[in-house]
Image: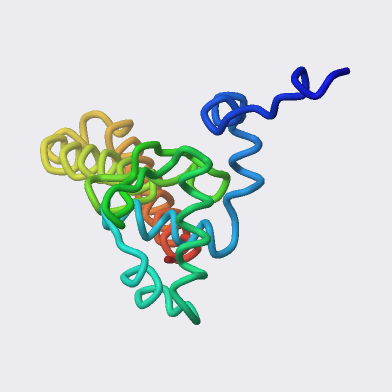
Amino acid sequence: MSESSKQEPTKSESAEKRTPGMVDAQLKGNTLRVYIYTLKKRKVGVREVQRALLMSNPSLAQYHLNKLRELGLVSESNGEYEVIGEVKVDVMRDFLRLGTLIVPRFVFYAVVFTVFAVYLTFVGYQYFSLVPVLEWLSFALAAAALVFWYEAARAWRSAPSP
């Protein structure tokens, strides 16, 4: 082969060939911490990341921000990095982002089951003696809500922190 046929792919071509598995493999450790911090803040600078994540020097923060840029997750303009792509890496699959807040999915399930349990208990209370199944259903909904609240708290404690 000649030298001209051995062209290296450009950055845009290599970014297009990336698969979610490749991003998962590269998004770990400090790079994951920087990504989560950037998700929460939306727009960050190198010094801000360095100070917030207690990194030893700005070049380390710069390295991880550039790694995120190469993965196509953030863009840089005037020294500030902004999230342009959201990826559900393995540790983040059980979380949803609401603005700058990252919340476990179980919180939503827990709220729904709690509302149904409370509603059925207050509305159906007068019918518990007539239809005993309502009492059991109300108890089952309350038990499910407790399980979801427990799982939400557990997920929140095990969440990767920036």
* Left/right of residue 152 with respect to residue 1 in the rendered view: left
Q: Which color scheme did the rendering employ for the protein?
A: rainbow
At which x and y percent is residue 128? 21, 37
Judge left or right: residue 4 versus residue 154. Answer: right
Image quadrant for the N terminus?
Answer: top right
Picture residue at 23% right of the left edge, 37% below the top? 116
Residue, far front: 3
Q: Residue 106 or 28: which is nearer the viewer?
A: 28
Quarter of the rendering occupied by the C terminus:
bottom left
Q: From the viewer's perspective, is 1 left or right of 130?
A: right
Q: Position of residue 88 (x, y in %)?
A: 48, 40
Q: Determine whether 91 is above or below 86 in the image.
A: below
* Displayed quadrant of residue 152: bottom left
Q: Which residue occupies the foreground of this view, 142 or 70?
A: 70
Q: Quadrant of residue 34?
A: bottom left
Q: Nearer the viewer, residue 129 or 67?
A: 67
The residue positioned 42% from the left and 73% from the top of the image is: 53
Residue 103 higher or lower than 5, as above or below: below
Q: Position of residue 26 (x, y in %)?
A: 63, 48
Position of residue 134 measured from the top left corner of the image (x, y, whole percent): 27, 33
- 47 in relation to 117, above or below: below
Question: Number of numbered discs present?
Answer: 0
Q: Name which residue lies at 53% across and 58% down.
A: 31
